[in-house]
Amino acid sequence: MFLVWFKNNNHDTIEATIHSNWKLEVWIELVVQRKTGGIYIMQDNARKITYGAMMIALFAILLAVSLYTPFLGNVTMFFIALPIILYRLKYDRNSSLLTLAAGIVLSLLIGGILLVPIAFVHGILGFIIGETIVRGKSKLYIFMASGLTLLITGMGVYVGAVLFFGFNMIDALMTVMEETKEQMKSFMANYGGVPDGYDEVVTSTFQMYEYTIPSIFIISIFMLAFILLTLNLGVAKRLGFEVPKFPPFREMKLPMIAVILYGAILLITLFAGVKPGTNLYLITVNATTVLRFLFLLQGVSLIHYYVNEMKLPKVATVVATIFALMLAPITTMLGILDTGVNLRAWLRKDKSK
């Protein structure tokens, strides 16, 4: 039949027929692709909504358990940000923000206004961690971003508590410390008497703690960020997500500017006549506290480096770390020297000899 039609028609007719049929086939193929693509998009949206609902529910459960369960809550509170992290690693930014907002609203319905600050802090933290991982940032960058996020949101919660609820955490802490001082004084009076100068020593110690609250808060925030990051990324890795790794602790190296800044603060303290209670005193005391803590970490890192270079067993690292923390002033000095004159280079030279 086809041969008879081919013989009875000229070249132009045959070409036009083939061309029209080709256009029809292309059109049919495009329609099929659009339909199947639409089905795929609908399925993807359904998965996204289902997964989001699961993560919102898990977020709310972790919040409720952390608030209402005494012992288990101490564990689950470290994983509140995990659902937001997992969702951001799997889906886009806008959907993640919507999931975060829904989680905060659900926390309000479950636990009232008390849960909202906790949900806000951990939710924002989870989103920042997920966002920085998706952008391919290093784990050190993610750690700094997480610490700054906790610091900013924590300060926001503190200011909100003072403005809206009249609750000042620092004043409450100082009240507790004052009560503790009085209890210790009465206890000593009942069992042998109060030592001479007790009030002056304890008062000056408590004043020092009060002055260094900002630096203690900053150090605590970044330590908490490190713990949260380590735990949550460990779980995400177990679930099959690709997450970055920290470089070995023994490779930690503070910049030279830290030593220069520390020296400048010491000179200001010695020659500027800084008086307790002034703004300059608060700045120098808190900066010194943070820098000494960093130099302590640098000293411990140097010890880890030396143990690794000597090929000693891991138990030696643990024992050396314990002694390093017990001898914190000496370890801090080692950290300052390692930052300023690079003691590791001397250790490498000695090993090469």
Image (spheres, helix red, strand yellow):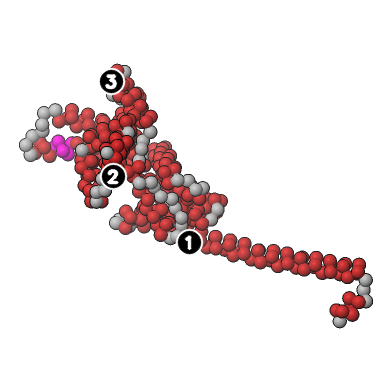
The amino acid type, in three-letter code, at marker 3 is Leu
The amino acid type, in three-letter code, at marker 1 is Met
Q: Where's the N terminus, which quadrant?
A: bottom right
Furthest residue in direction left, as rendered: 192
Residue indicated by mark 3: 270
Labelled pair 3, 1 in contact (Cβ < 8 Å): no
Residue at image point 35% right, 26% down = 260
Residue 265 at x, y percent in the picture: 33, 25
Q: Is residue 331 left or right of residue 108?
A: left
State the predominant SS element of the stretch in magenta: helix
Residue indicated by mark 2: 309
Residue at image point 54% right, 60% down = 48
**Could you say which is closer to the camera, residue 89 or residue 45?**
89
Residue indicated by mark 1: 54
**Could you say which is closer to the camera, residue 270 or residue 24?**
24
Q: Where's the C terminus, which quadrant?
A: top left
What segment is highlighted magenta in the picture? 182-186
